[in-house]
């Protein structure tokens, strides 16, 4: 008896209209061929501006998508209907906005996404609460509002992260360090429980496993922004720490951290306080925790994030509601 050669093949027929993920931009992995991935995505929410370090094919299988893209500093957009294909060459900055529900086939080099969000540190960046766009994390029950970012899942990033009640994050180490301020709820790991108002620094090389209780938690977090020699791991309960008089009447300061030219603090502004005009050596970053912060450039309510570059200037003040801000100075790139 002669035996032939039998090749057993795994085949699959995918009806794209029938696919729906649990969260926006969830995906069905179809295949990875020679380092190129094919994934079917479902979404009813926009993605974020990003850049691929390889080419990308974006094919609308069902629904409609407004694809926004930037070329030579100018923003443009196009409506993609079912059957239409958008090709992004290397370095094309783009973002997809579905019009209702959409299903998209994305073909790209594995790990090619290089997110760049507010990545020009020579420009002022402002994000107000009305600008928030929450993006699901790969971990279930975790959402992110990205403020600035360079990189994909491993990135230099400043982010607001919202943890659903009883959610968990995978164990991970901090290759570039982690600094966070708990805004709401209680953030926990194997080291401690950190209630709202806790400021935590985990330097390069530290490790933890976040676990969230019934209250959930929201944190303001900065990743990959540590100097290698800055190795002090600590936490401060700002509800109990001491305040010191500021440089002008009506200003109180709670120092959080200092290393080299970098300074982080909470600053409490009484109503109708005026600070002197000043320049930011090494830049300044502010997150408004309470009240409304003002300068000659604008009005910044609670939840606003402001990043001002090296040698920028402003004249800050408050009105009748005062303000509480997180502020960091001296940490941004200084262009020679």
Image (cartoon, rainbow, N blue to C red):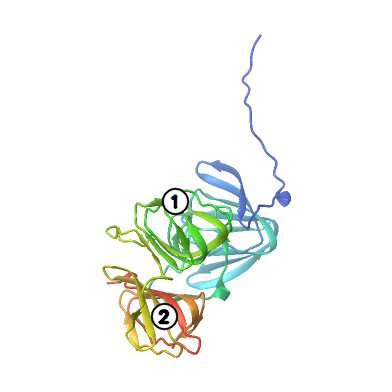
Q: Is residue 286 above or below residue 96?
A: below
The secondary element bearing badge 1 is classed as: loop
Query: Residue 268, which numbered label?
Result: 2
Residue 179: % across, % down = 40, 62
Residue 64: % across, % down = 69, 62
Reading the image, the residue beneath label 1 is: 190
Q: Answer with left or right where residue 312 lies relative to residue 136.
A: left
Q: Residue at x 55, y 67 (%)?
A: 69
Q: Is residue 25 above or below residue 145?
A: above
Q: Quadrant of the C terminus?
A: bottom left
Q: Is residue 131 visible?
A: yes
Residue 293: % across, % down = 46, 83
* Few, some or many residues within 10 Å of mark 2 (<14, 14–19, 20+): many
Q: Residue at x 64, y 14 (%)?
A: 3
Q: Answer with left or right where residue 80 lies relative to residue 144.
A: right
The secondary element bearing badge 2 is classed as: strand
Residue 150: % across, % down = 43, 61
Q: Is residue 93 visible?
A: no
Residue 22 versus residue 97: which sits nearer the camera? 22
Q: CA distance from mark 1 to mark 2?
A: 32 Å
* Sooner in the amino-acid sequence: mark 1 or mark 2: 1
Asked which quadrant contains residue 119, the reply is bottom left
């Amino acid at each position: 008896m002669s035996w032939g050669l039998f090749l057993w093949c795994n085949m699959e027929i995918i009806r794209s209209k029938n696919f729906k993920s649990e969260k926006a931009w969830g995906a069905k992995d179809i295949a990875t061929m020679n380092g190129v991935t094919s994934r079917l995505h479902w979404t009813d929410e926009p993605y974020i501006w990003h850049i691929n370090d390889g080419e990308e094919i974006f094919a609308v299988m069902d629904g409609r998508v407004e694809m926004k893209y930037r070329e030579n500093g100018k923003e443009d957009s196009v409506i993609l209907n079912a059957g239409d294909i958008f090709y992004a060459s290397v370095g094309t900055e783009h973002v997809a906005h579905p019009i209702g529900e959409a299903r998209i086939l994305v073909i790209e080099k594995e790990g090619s996404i290089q997110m760049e969000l507010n990545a020009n540190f020579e420009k002022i960046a402002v994000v107000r609460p009305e600008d928030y766009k929450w993006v699901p994390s790969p971990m279930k029950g975790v959402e992110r509002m990205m403020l600035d970012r360079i990189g994909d899942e491993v990135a230099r990033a400043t982010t607001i992260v919202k943890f659903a009640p009883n959610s968990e994050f995978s164990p991970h180490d901090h290759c570039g360090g982690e600094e966070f301020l708990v805004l709401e709820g209680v953030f926990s790991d194997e080291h401690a429980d950190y209630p709202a108002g806790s400021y935590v620094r985990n330097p390069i090389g530290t490790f933890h496993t976040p676990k969230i209780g019934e209250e959930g938690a929201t944190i303001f977090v900065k990743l990959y922004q540590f100097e290698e020699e800055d190795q002090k791991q600590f936490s401060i309960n700002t509800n109990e720490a001491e305040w010191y008089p500021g440089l002008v009447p009506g200003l109180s300061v709670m120092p959080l951290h200092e290393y080299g030219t970098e300074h982080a603090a909470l600053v409490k502004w009484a109503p109708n306080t005026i600070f002197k005009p000043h320049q930011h050596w090494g830049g300044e970053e502010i997150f408004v925790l309470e009240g409304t912060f003002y300068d000659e450039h604008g009005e910044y309510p609670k939840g606003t994030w402001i990043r001002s570059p090296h040698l920028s200037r402003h004249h800050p003040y408050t009105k009748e509601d005062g303000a509480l801000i997180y502020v960091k100075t001296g940490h941004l790139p200084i262009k020679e």
